Image (cartoon, rainbow, N blue to C red):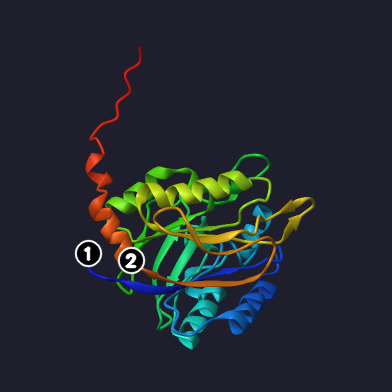
Amino acid sequence: MEQSKKIKIAALQMSSVVGDKRANFKCVENIVSKGFQGDTDILVLPEVWTVGWSCEDFVSSAETLDNSDTIKLLASIARDYNVNILGGSFILKNSDGRLYNTCPVINRKGELIAMYSKMHLYSYCGCTEGSYITTGKSPVMVDIDGVKTGLTICYDIRFPEIFREYRKAGADLLVNMAAWGISKPLPWEVLTRSRAIENQAYMVALTQSGHIKGDEWNIGHSRIIDYLGETIAEIKDQKQGIITCEINFNDMYAYRNSCTILKDIKKSYEVICV
């Protein structure tokens, strides 16, 4: 039996103002000040909350690591509320000028302890993320107060391989931070639930809400899902706010020990074509 773990986790759903970083900073500060509960261990933010889902605005919103207003804000919140933060994502500019859609992980002391850059870039149906953003190199699993947490961003959800590798590496919690379009409700519901079920892991599926531009909207249905695929906390529609729940991993560990699916994975799945 794995060591007992229990955490209180919060997910922040917000409607970003496209291209207005200062307004989005203020929005996060307001939501946290009004809806944050004490003794929370992990706070999760959505993808590109700093700028909204607007690939054309990614260049102007990019920040270098040594002078990042986003990381400074998240560090301040982490210290003020004594909480670890999975910072959704912001546009990180490397020294070579390349841009990355990057999630910063901040500990309770306000220290940057890890970063994950989105590995799969969505460039279909009119979206042009791959024209601006460079692909991240590898998955990142971070230990947060003893909870092994696998990080993914939005379109990564369509690639079960990354989630399986997290599970094989010992992940307790899987997180997908997104800016998911309202025109794709079924994939959002099914894929997030599936990643939890097939990996016997808790799943935070967090997305933006609100208007993007024209007739484009974010779906705004963020959920925390258990290892059986059941929704245990959610915020629907275009609401802004924080959902919070306590997760006790004991039942998950017991289920994994009785239903040992990882042992049934084959070394090869080479297809025989006839």
Identify the residue at image location x=35%, y=53%. Answer: 200
Q: Amino acid at mark 1?
A: Glu
Can you say whether 211 is above or below 135 in the image? below
Q: Nearer the viewer, residue 55 or 82?
A: 82
Identify the residue at image location x=61%, y=75%. Answer: 28
Q: Nearer the viewer, residue 124 or 258?
A: 258
Q: Residue furthest right?
A: 214
Figure quadrant of the N terminus: bottom left
Q: Position of residue 227 (x, y in %)?
A: 39, 56
**Residue 154 appearing in the image:** yes
Name the quadrant containing residue 70: bottom right
> In the rendered view, does 33 fall on the left or right side of 274?
right
Say which residue label 1 marks: 2
Say which residue label 2 marks: 249
Q: Position of residue 253 (x, y in %)?
A: 28, 60
Crowdedness near tag 1: few (<14), some (14–19) or many (≥20) residues, C-alpha within 10 Å? few
Identify the residue at image location x=66%, y=39%. Answer: 125
Q: Which mark is residue 37?
A: none
The answer to whether the residues at label 2 and label 1 have Cβ atoms under 8 Å apart is: yes
